[in-house]
Image: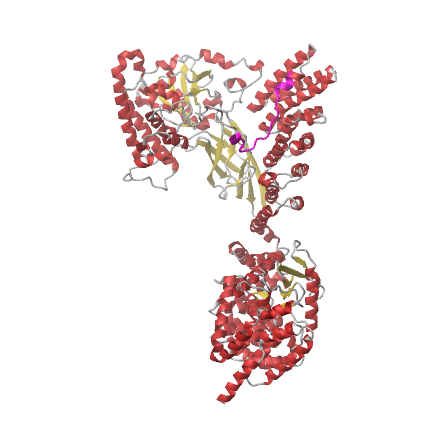
Amino acid sequence: MIKAILIFNNHGKPRLSKFYEHYSEDTEQQIIRETFHLVSKRDENVCNFLEGGMLIGGSDNKLIYRHYATLYFVFCVDSSESELGILDLIQVFVETLDKCFENVCELDLIFHVDKVHHILSEMVMGGMVLETNMNEIITHVDAQNKMEKSEAGIAGAPARAVSAVKNMNLPEIPKNINIGDISIKVPNLPSFK
Amino acid sequence: MALKIVKGSIDRMFDKNLQDLVRGIRNHKEDEAKYISTCIDEIKQELKQDNIAVKANAVCKLTYLQMLGYDVSWAAFNIVEVMSSSKFTYKVSCSQLQLQSVDAVLITTIINSVSLPLVTQDLSSPNQYDTGVALTGLSCFVTPDLARDLASDIMTLMSHTKPYIRKKAVLIMYKVFLKYPESLRPAFPRLKEKLEDPDPGVQSAAVNVICELARRNPKNYLSLAPLFFKLMTSSTNNWVLIKIIKLFGALTPLEPRLGKKLIEPLTNLIHRALDLLYGMVSKKNLMEIVKKLMLHVDKAEGTTYRDELLTKIIDICSQSNYQYITNFEWYISILVELTRLEGTRHGHLIASQMLDVAIRVKAIRVFAVAQMATLLDNGHLLTGNMQRNGICEVLYAAAWICGEFSEHLEDPMQTLEAMLRPKVATLPGHIQAVYVQNAAKLFATVLRKQEGTTDSLAAQETSQLLIDRLPLFVQSANLEVQERASCILQLVKYIQKLQQKEVEVAEEVTALFAGELNPVAPKAQKKVPVPDGLDLDAWINEPPSESESEDEKPKAIFTKEEPKHTRPRHTEVDEKELARRREARKQEQANNPFYIKTSPSSQKVYQDQPGVEHIPVVQIDLSVPLKVPGMPMSDQYLKLEEERRQKERSERKKKEKKKKREKHGRGRRADSGPESEEDITPAHHVDIVTEEMPEVCWVLLQWPLTDNEKLPVRTHRPAEAVKSPVEAGNGESATPEPKKKKEKKKDKERKVDLSSLTVYLTLFFSHIVYDVQGNLQDGSQVVVSVIFENKTDHFLKSMEFNVLDSLNSKLQRPEGSSPHDGLAVPFQLPPGVSNEARFVFSVQSIVMPQKLKGTLTFIVKTEDASTHEKLDFKLHFTCTSYLITTPCYSDAYAKLLESGELKSSSLKLEGVIMPFHHLLARICFHHHFSVVERIDSCASMYSRSIQGHHVCLLVKTVSTQRVPCLEWMSSILESTR
């Protein structure tokens, strides 16, 4: 079983968290912090698996992670999962994100966390792996996106227009933030794949 | 009303959506908490509105806030409300929310009462994504009550037409089982059914669920093992494979038999992993990786897997010219460590690595030599179990390295002593040969050292040691060993004589082995400049004329002959004849679909020739019906052979006419029929065969092989043994005798069925009869048909036939099996039943008889028990086993005898009392001869070996005493290379 899927950046800012077991909000935050602490101090060339932290299941638990550019993708799993299998799953996840967002970068995850959730829900359901075939995942995600658009129809049009206007400023906003938040390298956003 | 809607959507335009919220939070770095609390207030307002779109937007933002760690459980009711919306978009956002966090207190009841109808309604939606989202949502907040109420609905969904729904339903069943265990029993059959679902996604989901279930209680899932085994061998989905292996990991402790079954598929997977290692190594991690692998080697249980690891280690280390090895001492030690593996069949691989490294890495020689000397010293440990031992091959390398680089040896005397121990004689011949040769090298080194110290006595003692020990090898059955040993023994004896005269010999002895062996790069030849005046493209000898090379070609399929010997013959043929023959040949080539299949070397000759019209491809006449592809090869060869003979016969007739014209000029030789030379073309080149006399006669079948039964030429024996009795035999043998019997009648020719020596072995449990037959297709193969007869009252099964290979004869085993593996007999034997199995042996030399030891293992099944039994047997391959009954025309026979190229020998047998024609019949039947001609109590017989040797036999009864006298001749065709 997969217990949780976490994505956070090099500074430990959560970009996506999905818990398949119930924890209180506080515990969840603690888990994220602890995981970041465990993962971030590891060298680039060391093993991608490690014993899970105390909070999330203890010794039966494993953290499997990959580090792409500015982001850490961490899967917390129990002993019934294979490390290599999960590592492969992370790769599938990232490749799928890359296809859906066309050269995905951290900003995509920040502003479209709902979409990332959609994609994830096509791969993992209730802590169990649902689909590992990327084409299959993308087919279903695309089909659902189409449905959403057609549902919104005319009623959604003004909202979409407004959001389009708002989005026009999008590239500039991070630049302002960038002063305080070094993690986002805006000038040429590296694809983290 | 309309106004309200418009107002609603205009309001919406200015509501914060998720992106606004994210942006807002990022803009309020300093007072994030304050900003979010205002946002939450806004969301609360939004949730209070009637507009479901607004509510959905609010829920969407809540999802984000929840991730950031804000409590959203207060909104549970609204979330469920949005969930019930008919619009897909809104539901999606809800399903993302970790609703279970809501599940805490009182609200549980709300969810249960509210969500049940909503979810049920969605589950039956015609849109697969509506249902899908409902299922995803459900996976987050299944409660025992929900599970109980929805179990049957979800079970129905497991058989939905859409695989997308099916796989989700299957997965969610796991959650249902957890919350409502009673549902497991009724749902299980359907779940099991899903393991064989046509959709791989559904299959994988089912595997996932069952694996999770089995982790909790493996025992209940043992019955699924065969199904999973099938999946494991057929599935290509890595995820499924991994899961199944995990599952088997839980099942094997409960069912030990499973472990055995899993070995094969699992080793396949491990091999894949090992292949990855190959690409992973670098200079840095090589030692580490090899160390880990060595640990596995120690732990490995099956020899096959261990051997696999061993080859992998060597592959990894030796890849790209030892690119990753930084320390060769380490590598040598690894190799030496590997020699401690028992029963590996990769001894030769280790040996070749040792040789390669020692030769190519000069700096390592001192170390290598020291290690090898230890190996030799402990040689008895490696040869302990000869039966399944490939590891003794390393002694080959060890002996060679110690000998070649003996100057580095610390104590050469000790090594020399180790190499001459009597135990060495039990090693395979080729290793003994190296031992003997390198003992001589060591001897040279020792001599030099000892003479240096002016201790002449010690030097003489060393010589004596060799003289004492070498005779052991001189007696060896292996020709190579014998030859070398006898040569070196004489040399040492001579040296000893010199030593006794106090002559210093060390220098000269060392000179025998002077010269250092240097490694040569594979491309080194290219770097050597071509000397001036040497034109590599120029012909050294002009190529043979077209006609001649063409002439050879069809024959070359069967026999390797040297063109040289036929060439002079053609000088007798005039141009007209040549032209006619060329025409005939072209005709034949056009009709012969195999024509282009001749050996590449002869094709090459073609390419060098200018005449384009001779390129065979052009000449294929497509109207000629091609041979049926399924036809067995041997038949094709037979046909070809027939064609060829026919052709030759007709040619011979033509030639005969022609010759007759010349006859007068050429004298009396003509009456002996020059055409016979054509008849048996392969006889151009004749050599001696060492054939045993007794084998020719059935009566003497059991005679042991003695020295005087061999011809001397090909055997090597010590000088004192050379007084060959055969020489005397040769003197007596009346070669003219057969010549006199040239006036033949062809009708006397007899054909005898192809069949051969049968020996009966009565055995305790079963009865084996075997029959050895040459293989027409392949000169190096014989087929042994063994008839197994069960004479017991019990059922025999799992029979395995194994033969201990000799250097000369090897049982052909399927590719990839080790030379010690037995072959399974493809049937079982009920009591009293017999059946035949065939085994193919490859033989190198057919001029020596062979006895192969073998064992047959089988299981005897009695009523209450079954026991494992073993039966030892011997297979006798006599020289006549390799003969194939071949009819011979009397004139050809005469020509053959006349050629004078056959060696002959004769033998008198006494006490044979059977009638002469019985004797002939027996020889024909058991030894594959055919009678060429019989006159009274005198008969000439002919046979041919699978490698094309002619064997002629003259049997006659010496009048009064009725003693058959056998005269025999044979020939061996020298190979053209």
Q: Nearer the viewer, residue B637 or B700?
A: B637
Find residue B682 and report its image quarter: top left
Q: Position of residue B808 (x, y in %)?
A: 52, 29
Apparent side of residue B633 relative to residue B408 in the rendered image (left or right): left
Locate the N terminus of chain A by quadrant. bottom right
Q: Nearer the viewer, residue B453 or B796?
A: B453
Q: Is residue A130 above or below residue B930?
A: below
Q: Position of residue B821 (x, y in %)?
A: 55, 39
Q: Nearer the viewer, residue B833 or B906?
A: B906
Q: Is residue B251 above or below residue B718?
A: below
Q: Position of residue B480 (x, y in %)?
A: 56, 24
Apparent side of residue B129 relative to residue A52 in the rendered image (left or right): left
Q: Is residue B951 above or below residue B200?
A: above
Q: Position of residue B214 (x, y in %)?
A: 61, 62
Find residue A189 and report its image quarter: bottom right
Marks counted in the figure total 0
Q: Is residue B681 magenta?
A: no
Apparent side of residue B285 relative to residue B971 in the rendered image (left or right): right
Locate the C terminus of chain A by quadrant. bottom right
Q: Nearer the viewer, residue B45 or B439?
A: B45
Q: Is residue B522 magenta?
A: yes
Residue farthest bottom in this picture: B1
Residue at x-position 64% and y-position 60%: A64
First to last magenta residue range: B508-527
